[in-house]
Image (spheres, rainbow, N blue to C red):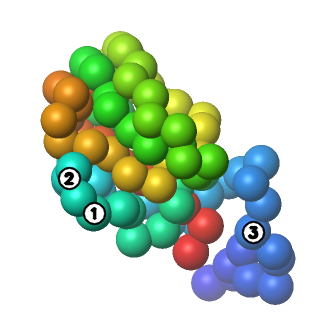
Amino acid sequence: MTNPFMNRAGSLQGPATDIQPVTPDDATDLQTVAIALYVETGGTLSIVTASGNTRQVELPDFSILPVGVRKVSQTGTTAIGIHALVLA
């Protein structure tokens, strides 16, 4: 199989090279800083951005939040089915 990602540098402009499920946690950062988040069921996301700022955003179902995220906090998060889009 041909892999179009082989020998290419990852880009913050996309596409992501992997997607990882996210379990919101107040104490633990994501394994890899996400270049975006995908949410299956909308609600509030309580996040810490790649630049270290704490934010809360409301998202509808099946949304992509195109911002670098280092943590999704449990406290304040009501959205479910959260996935981190990452450059692996």
* Disc 3 residue type (three-letter): Gly
Q: Residues within 10 Å of mark 3 (few under 14, many from 20)?
A: some
* Disc 2 residue type (three-letter): Asp
According to the picture, the residue beneath numbered tag 3 turns out to be 10
Q: Earlier in the sequence, mark 3 or mark 2?
A: 3
According to the picture, the residue beneath numbered tag 2 turns out to be 25
According to the picture, the residue beneath numbered tag 1 turns out to be 28
Circle 2 sits in a helix, a strand or a loop, which is it? loop
In the image, residue 78 above or below residue 69: above
Within the image, what quadrant is residue 78 found in?
top left
The N terminus lies in quadrant: bottom right
The C terminus lies in quadrant: bottom right
Residue shown at 23% from the left, 59% from the top: 27
Mark yes or no: residue 85 visible: no
Whether pointer 1 and pointer 2 mark residues with C-beta atoms closer than 8 Å, the reply is yes
Q: CA distance from mark 3 to mark 2?
A: 27 Å
Q: Residues within 10 Å of mark 1 (few under 14, many from 20)?
A: few
Circle 1 sits in a helix, a strand or a loop, which is it? loop
Q: CA distance from mark 1 to mark 3?
A: 25 Å
Residue 8 locus on image (x, y percent): 82, 76
